[in-house]
Image: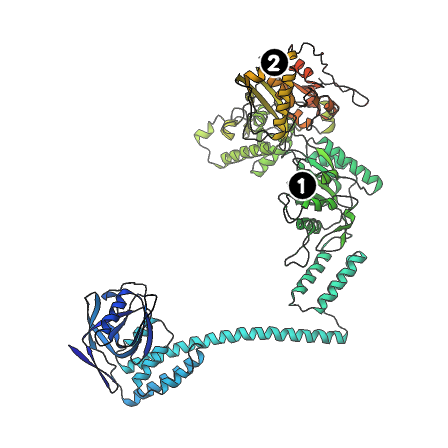
Amino acid sequence: MSLILTRDAERFQVPERLPVLPLRDVVLFPYVVMPLIIGRSQSLAAVDAAANDGNVVLLVAQRNADQQDPAAADLFRIGVVARLMQVVRLPNGTTKILVEGIARARVTRYATSAGTLRATIAPEPFVDEKEPADQSALGRRVLSLFEEYVSLHRRIPPEVVTLVQATASEERQACAVSAHLAVRHDVRQTLLEAPNLPALLSQLAQLLAAEIEILRLERKIEDDVRGSLFQNQREFYLQEQLKAIHRELGQEDDDFGDLEAAIEKKGLPDIVKARAHRELRKLRRMSPLSPEATVARNFVDWVLALPWTERTDDALDVARARVILDEDHYGLVEVKERILDYIAVLSLVGKLEGPILCLVGPPGVGKTSLGRSVARALGRRFARMSLGGVRDEAEIRGHRRTYIGSMPGRVIQAMRRAEVVNPVLLLDEIDKLGQDYRGDPASALLEVLDPEQNRTFSDHYLEVDYDLSHVLFITTANSLSTIPEPLRDRMEIIRLPGYLDLEKQAIARQFLIPKQLRQNGLDPASVTFEQPAVSDIIHRYTREAGVRDLERRIARIGRKLARRRAEPVTAASASDPNERSSTEATPAPAKRSRAKKAQQPSAPQPAATPAEGTTVTSENLRALLGVAPYDPADMSLEDKVGVATGLAYTSVGGETLEIEVAVVRGRGKVQLTGTLGDVMKESASAALSYARSRAAALGIDRDFHRSRDLHVHIPDGATPKDGPSAGIAIATAVISALTGLPVRGNTAMTGEITLRGRVLPIGGLKEKSVAAHRNGIAHVIIPFGNARELEELPEEVRAAVQFHPVRTMDEVMALVIPGVVATAPEMPITAPNVGVSAPTTH
């Protein structure tokens, strides 16, 4: 069966059932010619079916454009019968067709036939229902609005209006206008489904009026933006004219006048003042919008912000300074004496040019906080500059002003924060400086820390000399090994070996406990720490040279006690055995030696605790801190075969090392384990060579290196170890294992060994001695060349530990393995003469 479709005076005979071509995001109107690209298999089948049946196809829009294979329910019911005017097969498998809309049609039924979706259609023409005059007026209104719409829309060529106006019928005009509207496809479908021609024209009028309003608003926004740009150009032009008028009248800009007055008032050096005026003159000639103007203004601001002559008056009272240093820090006698010497010389001379102080010690001994105390004792301002992880030289010397976002280096920034030319400037973690392709910051510090050069320090940003000679520089480090030798040569090294147990107890009672209790909202007078409890915290819950971990443990106790105070009191908590009556007596701190009393103020006795107070005892420490991670009994002092105790110096302080040697049958293989460095491996090789060379005198089988395997192990294998100072300890353990004779367990040793059995000096004696004392070692064997350093050891260490200076391994054997060397001379336990006096080792 066929249908007759009319379009103006034309009549088209088409089949009643047509193949359906679904459209995505496209709606075709009658009278409109449109190219389409077809690629889906269903669409290609519809084109093929239409080509075989009169070249007529039904174009229907999809409800959802994302649907790849639409069914009948996914398609609208109103579509357009179109004629295939051209079909072109493309190489990529798609097909390009040119279609012309014939007439509107309604789908009465969808059905699939031979794999092709077909639709039974009925004609759906646009009917004229209004009077011709009314409909004509409505058509003219649409044409007028469409003309304005095209004039505002940038993507529709103006020729479209002429083509639409040239059409004969109002229906053709309405369809042409609908096809050229830049709206969504669902809005186009609504226009296509208009019940009659007047309704279509009315909808077009409303839609065009709304779109025109939106386009007008967009045009207004564009005009405003363009006007703003024009206004900025106009203002710049007027500002330039105003500057010219001011120059002609002899008047200057107020801002520039203020800057010039500030430069004159600042009291700058002549060279710096001339440079500031030159930059200000350049700034006057520049446009405010120029990037160079911002650079010049920032330079002038930095020059005015830096201190050039401003300084604070030094407090040169030595007695007051001693009181302040003792209030803030316990111990650190050598550092305090050096600071007091500085203050004394400053009070007599008025100026002191000397080496830079470098405080070297393990973490937590108070190096950083000591800088603040020095500033307070001198009455100077304090500034801190952290150098950890700094890898760029520009961090020290600054960036040149040719770079965007450039700024001075950290030294100049610290001086700006200090606001005076004579602050105390702390360079923290100087041993953590890095180095890469951007330069070496350690080399840049050579000028900063050299008293002969820092009076003319040059920052790349300022490009003028800045005087740093009035600054008191203090640096801190954990280890000297990573500091370059030229930089180390410019500093006076002061070692902080770590605190002894008595010092830790005094620091805990005088500083840490009151501080942490206050920070946790507790009154220090309401909490009592018994002496055994403090001792247990030090020995069983910490193992460090400083007091940082000790402070964390005390802080944890403070939080626990604060929680108990804050929680409601229950019957269970009332009977808690951890809470003891405050009426129990608190033992007094242990007495310090006479020398320590002379150097430090006596530790205050804990105040009496009120009735509702809390007492921390050894019994309730576990409830407050958990299981103790350390056991003092872990350090065995028993005599053992093949085990010797060595001493090591690390970045976290001194440590004791148990060196174990096992001898088994084999072929002379030597195995070294425990993450040993190259230097320590070489020391082990030297120790084995010494044992072989002295085998007869030591009572060892001459051929042990052929029939025995040796395994040298240093526990705590995850920690890297290196250095030559364990040489005599390794040799002692090897000889003990080969002879079967035990080594004295209460004796530790340190010293480098040679192939001839000589014992050479080592470094870090103070830290190693403190570690031996901390671990209960009674005897320490040291190289004879280090005997002169015994005077510098803390008095508590010298009183508790006996030191034995030795020259050779035979002397070591006589002390730790008696009888193994029959010809060894008896070694006295007194130190040799050092200087004028001969200090005695106990």
For the residue pair 755 and 306, the one nearer the viewer reads as 755
Task: Return the mark for residue 214.
Answer: none
Residue 62 lies, in percent from the top left, at 29, 68
Point out the tag, 1 or 2, that comes first from the N-terminus: 1
Give the distance between the C-alpha atoms of the residues marked 1 and 2, in whole angstroms: 51 Å
The structure residue drawn at horizontal position 80% and vertical position 21%, both measured from the top left corner, is: 837
Q: Is residue 775 left or right of residue 250?
A: left
For the residues bearing labels 1 and 2, Cβ distance under 8 angstroms:
no
Query: Please, which residue is most extreme toward the right here?
Result: 349
Mark 2 neighbour density, 10 Å: few (under 14) some (14–19) many (20 or more): few
Q: Residue furthest bottom?
A: 133
Q: Is residue 240 visible?
A: yes
Looking at the picture, does residue 481 appear above or below residue 199? Answer: above
Figure quadrant of the C terminus? top right
Closest to the observer: 176 or 376?
176
Up-down: is 644 above or below 678? above
In the rendered image, the quadrant that contains the N terminus is: bottom left
Q: Position of residue 126 (x, y in %)?
A: 25, 81
Q: Residue 724: name its quadrant.
A: top right
What kind of residue is marked 1? Ile
* Colouring scheme, one of rainbow, by chain, secondary structure, one colour: rainbow
Please state the horizontal and vertical placement of residue 331, each as a whole percent of the image. 69, 30
Q: Which kind of residue does numbered mark 2 sit on?
A: Arg
Please tell me the numbered disc located at residue 430. 1
Of residues 79 and 508, the one drawn nearer to the viewer in this rendering? 79
Q: Is residue 463 left or right of residue 62?
A: right
Location of residue 406 (image quadrant):
bottom right
Residue topped by disc 2: 702
Residue at disc 2, secondary structure: loop
Q: Is residue 86 above or below residue 562?
A: below
Taking the view exactly as shown, the residue that stands out farthest to the left is: 1
Element class at badge 1? helix
